[in-house]
Amino acid sequence: MDTMKTDILKGEAGIAEAVRLLRDEQVVALPTETVYGLAGDARSPLAVGRIYAAKARPSNRPLIVHVADAERVSDWASEIPDCLAALADAFWPGPLTVVLKRSPAVPDAVSAGLETIALRVPEHPVFRAVLEAVGTGLAAPSANPYQALSPTTAEQALDGLQGRIPAVLEGGPCALGLESTILDLTAETPRVLRAGPITASEIARRIGRPVAHPEAHDAVVPGNVKAHYQPRTPLQLTPVNRESIEQAAAETAFMVWSEGARHQLTRSGVAPEFRWVMPERSGDYAQALYNTLFRIDQSAAKAILVEPPPTGEAWRGVLDRLTRSQHRASDTSVD
């Protein structure tokens, strides 16, 4: 594709320019509370096509449509379950995406030809200001080349998409740093299709019904290919102990969270620049994950060994991203 100049937009003038570009069916990287998204008018096949082209994303992967509030859901969905009101009250604006039966008026391009639509009400004030001004839903997958790390700063979005899009709107670092939870509401039992900041248990408590979280499924949703969220540096999940440290190649970076692994790295004489200590709380770890991997990519490291995160529901999103990040990028199958 032809290259173009990519501008960093800031402040009120930047918001106005982003709105102008979006109304002109261009695409712009925008900040959300999760990660930066590559936004385009979800009603415009031209804009949606530009999203796919900029990301080099297969057109059979559906996009999430961001809307200003729960009242706009009926513009996109043909069936709205009773539990959506409770979910919207609890989690919107915020990092919850719901999958619903789509309206016949929804362009095939944004839903990849599926009979469903993925919808979210974002919380980030900059994204919301753009959304309100544009006056329509914005399709916005993560603002990165397909299968690469999701950006959590404007600079990271620019690094991945420079020359492919006209602009990135600055909105500061993303507060959550991990993509939204995706919840399928088209079946009798709601089910989580992508782990994220909101857990299945939290959802179940709000709606008073069981919520499934299958380990494997055949649903086609964003971020669900086996190889995804990949740093440029090869990554492997493995216990970090004396044996793995001794067997590691030179210039290996170690990402650890436990006190035992931290002490082992020190005792083994691993140089400080190859020791990356992650937070012990799941939310803090998630917020730091992609940014840490971006920083390692910019270091002298030739490989990354990651200590597996703790078990437990709160860690499922982190484990999901790390597991997919170690697969080969050529593997595009759905888990």
Image: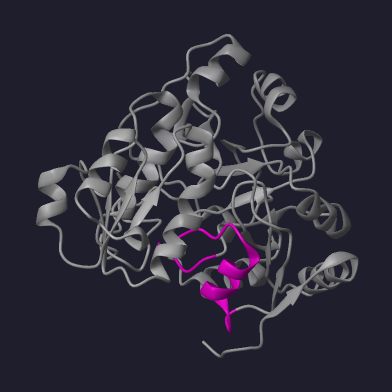
Q: Position of residue 311 (x, y in %)?
A: 33, 27
Picture residue at 66% right of the left edge, 24% below the top: 87
Q: Is residue 29 above or below residue 76?
A: below
Say which of 239 and 119 sits in front: 239
Would residue 241 be visible to someone looking at this image? yes
Left or right position of 282 against 97:
left
Picture residue at 54% right of the left edge, 34% below the top: 197
Q: Residue 110 sits in which quadrant?
A: bottom right
Say which of 111 and 179 sits in front: 179
Q: Position of residue 106 (x, y in %)?
A: 66, 51
Q: Is residue 64 above or below residue 218?
A: below
Q: Position of residue 273 (x, y in %)?
A: 36, 62
Q: Is residue 260 above or below residue 200?
A: below
Left or right position of 298 against 140:
left
Would residue 61 be visible to someone looking at this image? no
Say which of 272 and 53 sits in front: 272
Q: Is residue 318 above or below residue 38?
A: above
Left or right position of 324 against 13:
left
Q: Look at the image and tell me in which quarter the C terminus lies.
A: top left
How many marks can you see? 0
Left or right position of 61 against 287:
left
First to last magenta residue range: 144-164
Q: Position of residue 229 (x, y in %)?
A: 41, 56
**Colouring style:** one colour
